Image (cartoon, rainbow, N blue to C red):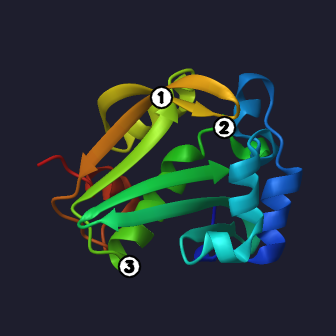
């Protein structure tokens, strides 16, 4: 991933993600078409508001993320990578770049995310990026009750000039 650029999610890219991104096997759960409410939020500019962002590498769409900052100093974060890029070691740099953007643009002390318990690959990546497992919970989504894991990270310090090697340290637990 080179020349990463993050900007507001365009309608064209929202429709591509919603209609064309299809994940294999158990990861099909993450297809936007699997949940009508998620699908509508993704394709409707009005419902997306200012919360959705696209991530480009060499001007090609590689992923997106969504933020919810309704709780002061806490930002809940969701993300998705282009299906063919998952499972190949791209997650860590993707997460680091998106969190760097969040820290530069939002006043936060904690970043949270939720992940399906079956997604061991993502959980491992989140842990490598400094997230800590907080609690397990169940919620109805995609017409199913699914076990989820809530992960949390407290932001203590961040040096935006740090080298890529030091990026593992930009999120620290208080």
Q: Earlier in the sequence, mark 1 or mark 3?
A: 3
Residue behind mark 1: 148
For disc 3, the neighbor class at 10 Å (few under 14, some 14 to 19, many from 20) is few
Q: Earlier in the sequence, mark 1 or mark 2?
A: 2
The image shows residue 145 at horizontal and vertical percentages of 58, 23
What residue do we see at 56% from left, 20% from top? Answer: 118
Calculate the distance from the C-alpha at mark 1 to the C-alpha at mark 2.
Answer: 23 Å
Q: Quadrant of residue 14?
A: bottom right
Image-based side of 144 in relation to 36, left or right: left
Q: Which mark is residue 105?
A: 3
Residue behind mark 2: 88
For disc 2, the neighbor class at 10 Å (few under 14, some 14 to 19, many from 20) is few
- The correct choice, above or below, for 54 with respect to 89 in the image is below
Helix, strand or loop at mark 1: strand
What residue do we see at 74% from left, 42% from top? Answer: 35
Which of label 1 and label 2 is nearer to you? 1
Residue 51: tell me if it is visible.
yes
The image shows residue 9 at horizontal and vertical percentages of 67, 73
Front-most of residues 140 and 120: 140
Helix, strand or loop at mark 3: helix
- The correct choice, above or below, for 47 with respect to 132 in the image is below
- The correct choice, above or below, for 40 with respect to 53 in the image is above
């Amino acid at each position: 991933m080179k020349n990463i650029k993050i900007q507001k999610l365009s309608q064209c890219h929202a429709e591509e993600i919603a209609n064309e991104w299809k994940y294999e096997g158990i990861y099909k759960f993450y297809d936007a078409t699997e949940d009508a409410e998620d699908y509508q939020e993704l394709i409707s500019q009005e419902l997306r508001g200012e919360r959705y962002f696209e991530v480009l590498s060499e001007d090609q769409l590689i992923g997106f993320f969504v933020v919810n900052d309704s709780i002061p100093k806490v930002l809940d974060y969701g993300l998705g990578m282009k299906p063919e890029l998952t499972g190949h070691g791209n997650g860590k740099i993707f997460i680091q770049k998106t969190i760097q953007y969040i820290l530069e643009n939002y006043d936060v002390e904690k970043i949270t995310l939720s992940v399906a318990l079956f997604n061991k690959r993502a959980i491992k990546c989140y842990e490598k990026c400094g997230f800590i497992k907080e609690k397990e919970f169940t919620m109805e989504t995609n017409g199913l009750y699914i076990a989820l894991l809530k992960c949390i990270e407290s932001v203590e310090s961040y040096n935006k000039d740090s080298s890529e090697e030091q990026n593992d340290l930009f999120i620290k637990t208080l």
